[in-house]
Amino acid sequence: MNRVYNFSAGPAMLPEEVLKQAADEMLDFGGSGMSINEMSHRSKAFDGVIETAEKDLRELLQIPDNYKVLFLQGGASQQFAAVPMNMMKNKKAAYIVTGQWAKKAFQEAQIYGETVKVADSSDQTFSYIPDCSNLDIPEDADYVYICENNTIYGTKFHTLPDTKGHDLVADVSSCFLSEPVDISKYAVMYGGVQKNIGPAGLVISIIREDLIRDEVLPGTPTMLKWKTQADNGSLYNTPNCWSIYICGLVFQWLKKNGGLSEMKKRNEEKAKILYDYLDSSKLFKGTVRKEDRSLMNVPFVTGDDALNDLFVKEATAQGLVSLKGHRTVGGMRASIYNAMPKEGVEKLVTFMEAFEKQHG
């Protein structure tokens, strides 16, 4: 078996022991004589899977009792519409635009009400997080929206915005379960799981119960009403059973490996190895303001497109794959989520050092 170190932004690496367990159970899950992919989502066996997954997630994040956990389809992008549909009582919302996904969410919300851009970092290619300590938020705004970790640009809100009493909605797709968080600071937290938790095709939404209500925007599809999903325990229709199952195994892996405090420690250690090298390198440089750097996504460049392409090609040959950066930033990007071992980052830096000696 020739496993590579996969630095993809998503779908991304999964813990090897999780993949092995899934392989072992592929033909016979729990003595049922069938795969998880074949069984009814109404069966007792699957009830156990989804209930255990929610219990473990609640434990990991210490989710308060007045929050619902929903396992939904459509990815994070579908929540760009679901959020305003379910939350826009006054048909007004404030958005902080720090990257492509926040920008897309902002544009989507314009369909449903007045959206006010209260902070924006597009002036420097989203390479920093703007000061959000004293924003001009309309008093009648229904919520304030952020994308907490920007996968493409490698920035992270290390301090949450002062929402001045308004509900905070956060897309946490690329930092989900990477560190402990205080859920009570959020009205809604959601994320696609394909970056840091599981396979593509699932979004997990954690929603304060008072926001799950019948009063939604006229024309909201039944499937996009949070109340529909909450009332049916995420089983209104057939969910992504496979992804929920794998996420459940990852939750157990996280618990076994010390929980989110340990993940934060490991992630800080991995990121430090890479950022320390970038800060000392004469050939490579990071693209993000230091105080806003993400622990999950690390973009870097050489300043020469041909050299960038050569680096990606030669790295791939060394088993360091999916390092090509997003087209809007160029260069390279290393996504070093929970499942990326420290050895993978060390091997990357060793390769970067050799490449710099040859081409620097």
Image: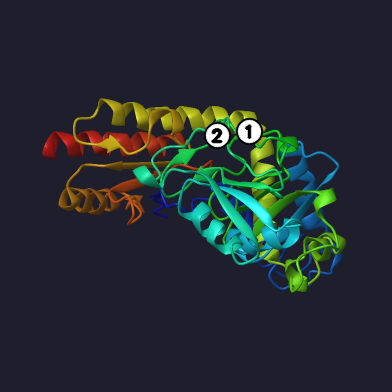
Q: Is residue 221 above or below residue 258?
A: below
Q: SS at mark 1?
A: loop
**Residue 230: image x %, image y %?**
83, 59
358 vs 139, left or right, is left
Which residue is drawn at the image coordinates 86% and 63% (left, top)? 214
Determine which quarter of the picture holds residue 199. bottom right
Q: Which residue is mark 2?
A: 132
Check disc 2 and give the amino acid type. Answer: Cys
Where on the picture, by quarter, is residue 257?
A: top right
The quadrant of the rendering that contains the N terminus is: bottom left
Q: Is residue 227 above or below residue 294?
A: below
Which residue type carries mark 1? Asp
From the top left corner, tell me how far across and down residue 301 is, in percent. Answer: 26, 43
Q: Secondary structure at mark 2?
A: loop
Q: Which residue is mark 1?
A: 162
Pointer 1 with pointer 2, Cβ within 8 A: yes
Q: Is residue 295 left or right of residue 23?
A: left
| Residue nearest the observer in this picture, 223 or 278 | 223
Quote the CA–CA distance across marks 1 and 2.
6 Å
Disc 1 or 2, which lies upstream in sequence?
Answer: 2
Q: Is residue 238 visible?
A: no
In the rendered image, is residue 144 in sight?
A: yes
**Is residue 303 depicted above or below 26 in this figure?**
above
Q: Nearer the viewer, residue 315 or 93?
A: 93
Q: Position of residue 291 (x, y in %)?
A: 44, 28
Q: Residue 305: x and y, percent? A: 19, 51
Instruction: Tell me the crowding category of disc 2: few under 14, some 14 to 19, or many 20 or more residues within 10 angstroms, Cα based.
Output: some
Q: Nearer the viewer, residue 113 or 74?
A: 113
- Residue at 34% x, 54% y: name it: 328
Instruction: Name the disc covering residue 230, or none.
Output: none
With 37 as the anchor, is 116 left or right in this view? left
| Image quarter in which the C terminus is found | top left
